[in-house]
Image (tube, helix red, strand yellow):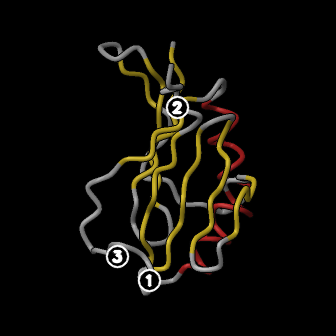
Amino acid sequence: MADLRVKGLITFLYYEDLEKATRFYEKVMGFELAIDQGWSKIYRIMNGSYIGLVDEKHGYHKASPTKPVVICLNVFDVEAWYSYLEEKGVDTLNKPTYSKELKIRAFLLLDPEGYLIEIQESI
């Protein structure tokens, strides 16, 4: 019988300035570089979950000013993430807020080229 299990998931984002994006995801977000393909960098967020940063000059897509994607990180401590990012000098779009309807505390920020990142904690 064929093995159809999935080992992981990579979401690829396309950048005009790959170096700037690389610095942000390594130095600010603290993600581990799992695979370096030169014009594509794949970072482990957690076991089986990855984000890929691609230089638009080589990738399948081009970077676009419209970013209809949200990278949502479900974390254990949203306040700790907020404090950590403040210490790193990252401007966030808001402070952690509670959504009774969604049962989460969350805040938002933008990466260097405008991809929206939501840091959320299930309550």
Q: Amino acid at mark 2?
A: Val
Of the numbered discs 3 and 2, the one sitting upstream in the chain is 2
Task: Write down the residue under mark 3.
Answer: 63
Dot 2: few (<14), some (14–19), or many (≥20) neighbours within 10 Å?
few
Of 37 and 64, nearer the camera is 37
Question: Residue 45, position in %: x, y?
Answer: 65, 43
Q: Amino acid at mark 1?
A: Glu
Of 89 and 62, nearer the camera is 62
Please indicate whether residue 94 sits to the left or right of residue 84 in the image: left
Contact (Cβ within 8 Å) of mark 1 with mark 2: no
- SS for callout 2: loop
CA–CA distance between discs 1 and 2? 30 Å
- SS for callout 1: loop
Of the numbered discs 1 and 2, the one sitting upstream in the chain is 2
Task: Write down the residue under mark 1.
Answer: 16
Q: Amino acid at mark 3?
A: Ala
Q: Quadrant of residue 57?
A: bottom left
Dot 1: few (<14), some (14–19), or many (≥20) neighbours within 10 Å?
some
Q: Quadrant of residue 33?
A: bottom right
For discs 3 and 2, the disc positioned in front in the rendered view: 2
Contact (Cβ within 8 Å) of mark 3 with mark 1: yes
Task: Write down the residue under mark 2.
Answer: 6
- SS for callout 3: loop
Question: Residue 70, position in %: x, y?
Answer: 37, 47
The label shown at residue 70 is none
Dot 3: few (<14), some (14–19), or many (≥20) neighbours within 10 Å?
some
Please indicate whether residue 86 sits to the left or right of residue 74 in the image: right
Of 4 and 28, nearer the camera is 4
For discs 1 and 2, the disc positioned in front in the rendered view: 2
- Residue name at image x 62 percent, y 59 percent: 42
